[in-house]
Amino acid sequence: MFVFLILVIAVGYAISWYTGAPEILYIAVIFAVLMNFFSYWFSDKIVIKLTRALPVSPDSNRELWSIVENLSITAGLPMPKLYVINDSAPNAFATGRSPKHSAVAVTTGLLAILNKTELEGVIAHELSHVGNRDILVATIAVTLAGFIAILADISFRMTYLRGNSRENKGGGIFMILAIVGIILAPIAAKLIQLAVSRKREFLADASGAMLTRYPEGLASALQKISEYGMPMKHASHATSHLFISNPFGPRDVAGFMNKLFSTHPRVEDRIAALLGKI
């Protein structure tokens, strides 16, 4: 997050110098703050709508409700709102700005293929996201990445509309560095965001295993989820980082570049970490 902050400051300064238009920074900051505000305060409602999740009551699914309730008590967390997504692809996610305003959703496919200990492992993983404030961290990372992309886009447009106000002021080397920075900054920001997402998945796996005291349950669940092989019906890039597994289906992330651009760690690595093999 510190590197992210430095990157935002550097890009902002480079764009302000290169375009000679510091006012675009004020516009971008206001836009970013508003975007951050709405994504933070209404993230749970937005994600629930996007995934078409339906609320669960104790009467509609007693076993699932009991598992979530018991693990919430064990973790010292309030009972989150509980939802089910009508989708045969096994998956789950947690969202919400704080433990008091959290929600957990699972797919019907997940309920169909997992036994009780495996389901407990998945729910513990999602509750760990809530307890670790991962939704807040993810919101900040996504907002900062979007902020940098917006700044870069505005700078290019301003350059074409107004011309380069620095071209006759002897700043040749800095101008080149500014242009390169403007081009590469959105890519760097996205890579940092994805790296944060992968690290938080490992952390939630570890926290979930500590919560259930049975890491084999989550490891077995991850193995079953990865073997399904088909994407969710309403998969979205906007929410893909929230799920316990990539909603677009398992992908080969063995290569270095594939790992860099993946929202989730390799299942094999997660299972090995849970079982103490790495």
Image: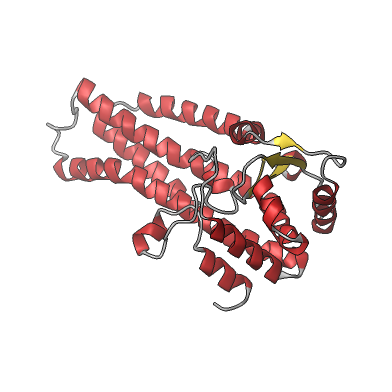
**Quarter of the figure with residue 147:** top left
Give above or below for 173 relative to 205.
above
- Residues 181 and 201: in front is 201
Residue 20 visible in this rendered orientation of the protein = no
In the visual, does 183 lie left or right of 140? left
Q: Where is residue 268 in the image (x, y as percent from the top left)?
A: 52, 68
**Quarter of the figure with residue 122:** bottom right
Give above or below for 44 relative to 199.
above
Specify the quadrant that holds the C terminus.
bottom right
Q: Where is residue 137 in the image (x, y as percent from the top left)?
A: 58, 47
Q: Position of residue 138 (x, y in %)?
A: 56, 46
In the visual, does 92 lie left or right of 32? right
Q: Residue at x 30, y 35 (%)?
A: 15
In the visual, does 83 lie left or right of 275? right
Residue 230 visible in this rendered orientation of the protein = yes
Q: Residue at x 79, y 57 (%)?
A: 75
Q: Report the number of discs.
A: 0
- Residues 144 and 83: in front is 83
Q: Position of residue 194 (x, y in %)?
A: 46, 52
In the visual, does 267 lie left or right of 192? right
- Residues 160 and 214: in front is 214
Q: Which residue is drawn at 26% across and 30% down?
A: 156
Q: Residue at x 47, y 49 (%)?
A: 193
Spot the residue most to the bottom: 277
